[in-house]
Amino acid sequence: MGRIEDEILQSKFEDEHQKVVINVLFTASWLDVKNIQRLKPFGISPQQFNVLRILRGSFPNALRLGDISDRMIDKNSNATRLVEKLRQKIW
């Protein structure tokens, strides 16, 4: 990765704040793509990996779905749906 100006082909920004925000959003998107590529061989999404990470961290204690939801990085994810998809992959 190079300078944000070169990556998004934009040479001018309203101010430094806008430039920083755009750079953070660009970097987050870049990391998301890398994470998806890393998880693809395992057939799971980043959200499913997050659920597995949470469950591993609580082991050997069980968690309620609400507890999983509270600990998720992406608060817009549906923990019930994610857990069900993971359950189906196991069986």
Image (cartoon, rainbow, N blue to C red):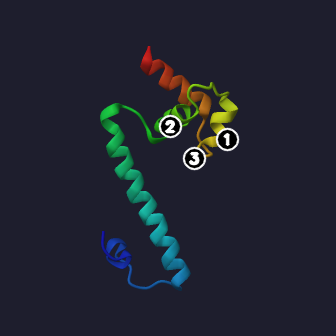
| Amino acid type of the residue that numbered disc 3 sits on in the rendered structure | Asp
Is residue 51 shown above or below 60? below
| Amino acid type of the residue that numbered disc 2 sits on in the rendered structure | Arg
Mark nearer the viewer, 2 or 1: 2
On screen, residue 85 versus residue 79, left or right, reads: left
Q: Earlier in the sequence, mark 3 or mark 2?
A: 2
Residue drawn where x is 62% and y is 26% of the image: 61
Q: Residue beneath label 3, please?
A: 74
Q: Residue furthest top?
A: 91
Query: How far apart are the alpha carbons under marks 3 and 2?
Result: 13 Å
| Amino acid type of the residue that numbered disc 1 sits on in the rendered structure | Asp
Q: Which numbered tag is attached to residue 70?
A: 1
Alpha-carbon neighbours of circle 3 within 10 Å: few (<14), some, or many (≥20)? few
Mark nearer the viewer, 1 or 3: 1
**Residue 11, horizontal then vertical, whole percent:** 38, 84
Query: How far apart are the alpha carbons under marks 2 and 1?
Result: 13 Å
Query: How far apart are the alpha carbons under marks 1 and 3?
Result: 10 Å
Q: Which numbered tag is attached to residue 53?
A: 2
